[in-house]
Amino acid sequence: MEKRITTPLTAEKVKDLRTGDTVLLSGVIYTARDAAHKRLCELLEKGEKLPFDPKDQVIYYVGPAPAKPGKVIGSAGPTTSYRMDAYAPALIREGLKGMIGKGKRSDEVRETMKECTAVYFGAIGGAGAVLANSIKKAEVIAYEDLGAEAIRRLEVEDMPLFVIMDCYGGNLYESGRKEYLESVKK
Amino acid sequence: MKEISAEDITSVIRRLCMEANSYLPDDIKGKIATCRMTETWNLAKNILGVIEGNFSVAENDFVPICQDTGVACVFLEIGQDVHINGNLREAVDEGVRQGYTDGYLRKSVVKDPLDRVNTGDNTPAMLYTEIVPGDELKITVAPKGFGSENMSAIKMLKPSDGIEGVKKFILETVENAGPNPCPPIVVGVGIGGTFDKAALLAKKALMRSTDVRNEDKLYADLEEEMLEKINALGIGPQGVGGATTALAVNIEKMPTHIAGLPVAVNINCHVARHRSAVL
């Protein structure tokens, strides 16, 4: 099913999403990848305030290419999510409701998603030029020294995503493959 | 003796870095188009459609196909009758620096693998030089993304493992990678040599057109068989299920030691970039 979703992403909206749904996401989202996640979790450990409040927010695992003159942002497709697995549960516990990336997640992340009602979206890896077109505004809000890895506040419009893991334990990487293989056997 | 200036090398590498990141080789585009036609799984078909559309946007707007514009792997085949005026290493890095800066490409290289501070200009290049007969200099730039590089693997098999052991290891590596390396992938395999040579062969295999099979029939058949076996896994584009997990398996081989059977599997995503020029 195709669903239009606007951030902030409340638990109610998350509960409505199912593995395999295609989603057009609009609103504000935040970027963070390896280095930014490390810093965010160091702040949490010290009990300090994060550069943005993760409550009901979505983090996009991306390190965009620099913007060409006249463009909002450079190519901006997802990076592989498992590298953020060590940090994601702490952020989900702080209220983070959505993650956008590609690839497998750890059991711990999946359990925390179930427990705290969060969703994992997939964006098409390698389709960075097309995905950049759904980003209407981009602004660095923290860790400018990290360059591509800085935290950016993005405003997106109809960003094409699909639900890989929902808050009920569904996993498209398992079910999609299984259903496809069954369809071939028939 | 032919004289080639370091400045000319810099300017060619600058151009190749930019072009390789926006223009995909025709064989890859052709393979994606064919797979989209034959793919039976709906979501998989849609994803292949978006991937094709993305190639057009990148080409028309001259922006990178993928934001991971990679580490610049630079291969130089230097004719033995060529003399280079100037510092070759610096000329190559200057080309990468200019290409990635002027081309608005992402700088993805850290100076130290543990300290992890970005070099800020995507240097140094991963530089390979080879001396060949003749008086030409062939330059190939292959920007390599790490989503797929991280899913690559190498194993020192025993001679008794034989061809079945090789098949098992290739299949296992692709299966373990699953959705992570952005399938549909191109699988580069290096068999033989030493630990390091097998890895280099696997990388070089990714540089060969996916329309060309190994000239040795045994290996050409192995390429075909492995492509079929990989696509029967059902991983599909982006791992959502489907018939299109790999676009091609390219294998390179070389002589090896009586005691060994090194096998390296270097995975590339569908953005299988490389571009060459001859000076």
Image (tube, helix red, strand yellow):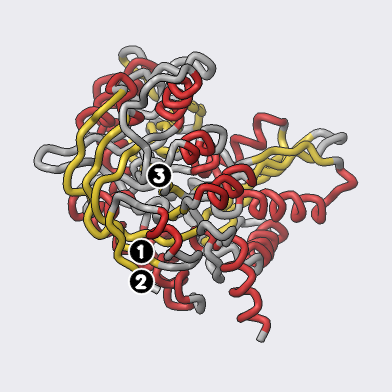
Dividing the picture into quadrants, the one containing residue A3 is bottom left
Whether discs 2 and 1 lie on one chain: the answer is yes
Residue B265 lies, in percent from the top left, at: 64, 44
The residues bearing labels 2 and 3 have C-alpha atoms spaced at a distance of: 36 Å
Q: In this view, does A181 lie to the left or right of B238?
A: right
Crowd around label 1: few <14 · some 14–19 · many ≥20 (10 Å): many
Q: Which residue is drawn at 31% across and 36% down?
A: B17
Where is mark 3, residue-wise?
A: B274
User: Contact, CB < 8 Å: mark 3 with mark 1?
Assistant: no
Question: At numbered mark 2, what does the secondary structure look like: helix, strand or loop?
Answer: strand
Question: At numbered mark 3, what does the secondary structure look like: helix, strand or loop?
Answer: loop
Of the pair A113 and B209, the residue shown nearer to us:
A113
Callout 3, which amino acid?
His
Q: In this view, does B85 lie to the left or right of A80?
A: left
Q: Is residue A126 above or below residue A61?
A: below
Q: Residue furthest bottom?
A: A186
Crowd around label 3: few <14 · some 14–19 · many ≥20 (10 Å): many
Dividing the picture into quadrants, the one containing residue B216 is bottom right
Q: What's the chain of the residue with tag 1?
A: A
Q: In this view, does B150 lie above or below A161?
A: above
Please give the label number shown on residue A2: 2
Where is mark 1, residue-wise?
A: A23
